[in-house]
Image (cartoon, grey):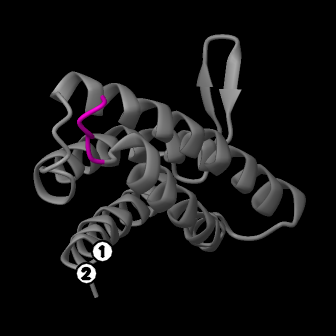
Amino acid sequence: MPLHTFRYAACGGGNTVLDILLFSAFYNFVYQKQNLHIGAYTLSPHIASLISSFSISFCTGFYLNRFVIFHESGLSKRAQLSRFIVVNAICIVLNIVFLKLLVDGLGLYPTPAKIIATVFIICFSYFSQTYFFFKKKTVAE
């Protein structure tokens, strides 16, 4: 296994476990499986938990990507952050779609639904970050 792939798997796996644990803690203990009312808006507890856990795992994920996995990319911190924001914006939308489908549509429990969604999103994230968002800078760039 290439060192880059190992680093991606180890860091990404650790951050993914952190995200799922945070999701479960927010869902069960912070929001206590109740809707979150914010003014005129109401968020289901699984979507509120997703947003809360994402706000933490986004930060840890960026720094792991920047300093451990893709440290040799040659891109500036600003360029990496902007690319990381794009890929994570796509991932958060995919997470919401999967959770709405799996929890609201199919009636699965939120934590297993989050794990299922994460498996698909990891594949997208790996390929998009490796081959587009954090690819090594070439001489022509």
Specify start and end residues of the magenta stretch as a single range: 136-141
Q: Was residue 12 drawn as part of the magenta stretch in this picture?
A: no
Q: Nearer the viewer, residue 74 or 112?
A: 74
Amino acid type at mark 2: Pro
Where the N terminus falls, by quadrant? bottom left
Kindly identify which residue carries mark 1: 5
Amino acid type at mark 1: Thr
Element class at badge 1: helix
Q: CA distance from mark 1 to mark 2?
A: 5 Å
Kindly identify which residue carries mark 2: 2
Q: Which residue reaches farthest front?
A: 140
Q: Identify the main secondary structure in magenta.
A: loop
Q: Position of residue 109 (x, y in %)?
A: 69, 69
Residue 91 can be seen, yes or no: yes
Q: Was residue 139 drawn as part of the magenta stretch in this picture?
A: yes
Q: Which residue reaches farthest bottom?
A: 1
Mark 1 crowd level (few <14, some 14–19, many ≥20, 10 Å Cα): few
Asked if residue 38 is positioned above or below residue 136 in the image, the reply reads above
Asked if the residue at tag 2 contacts the one at tag 1, i.e. Cβ–Cβ closer than 8 Å, the answer is: yes
Q: In the rendered view, does 64 fall on the left or right side of 108?
A: left
Asked if residue 8 is positioned above or below residue 136 in the image, the reply reads below
